[in-house]
Amino acid sequence: MVRSDARENRARILEAARQAFAEDGETSMNQVAQRSGVGAGTLYRNFPTREALVLSVYQREVEQIIDTVAGLLATLPPLEALRCWTTDLVAAMRKKHGLGDALSPSAHQTITEQTYGPVIAAITQLLDAGKRDGTIRADADPGDFLQLTGALWRAASDRSQPMLGLILDGLSTEQQR
């Protein structure tokens, strides 16, 4: 069992790293340690490499996005919940891509493998809600949707919302168009 102070240190490190990487993708491990108020030993005990830290930050962000699905579906119609959720996912994908040099090809592969299943499950939950209320086509596939949205993070930021609108229009049932 992990001690509570160790859990708190880890959480502080991840939050400090998230903020630091958002400001400057070249942030060093020492800068993260200083920002989080822990010694270098504590930082390296939790994250032996910068890449491990970057992967953990990204993994945590994806988990937080996935955790929003239920709340979105509780407050928004499924198609609008899907729009909001996808916008957040695209922002996270852009961040991961922006860290490009910090991650080796194998690290990119690792994070993709770790997040694919949970992301597909979240998309399935959103699509299924729309299928149940008749606003999303019955043949909408979570894997196809993820593949299509993969193009959004590559698009100019001012184009991603219009492109997402086209994707969502394609998912809508005839009664919604």
Image (spheres, rainbow, N blue to C red):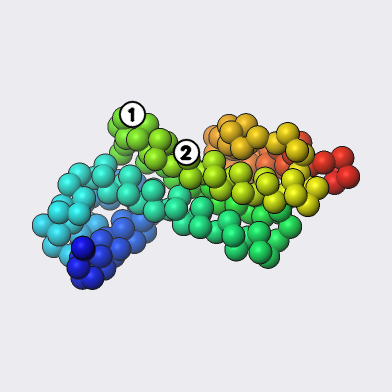
- Percent x, y of residue 70: 59, 60
Of callouts 1 and 2, which one flags the residue occurring earlier in the amino acid sequence?
A: 1
Which numbered disc covers residue 116?
Answer: 2
Residue at horizontal 23%, vertical 70%?
A: 4
Under mark 1, the amino acid is: Pro
Under mark 2, the amino acid is: Tyr
Q: Is residue 148 above or below residue 99?
A: above
Whole-number angstrom distance, CA of label 1 to CA of label 2: 16 Å
Residue at horizontal 44%, vertical 45%?
A: 95
Q: Secondary structure at mark 1?
A: helix
Q: Quadrant of the C terminus?
A: top right
Q: Quadrant of residue 155?
A: top right
- Percent x, y of residue 35: 25, 64
Q: Residue furthest bottom?
A: 4
Residue 30 visible in the shown view: no
Q: Quadrant of residue 37?
A: bottom left
Residue 137 visible in the shown view: yes
Mark 2 neighbour density, 10 Å: few (under 14) some (14–19) many (20 or more): few
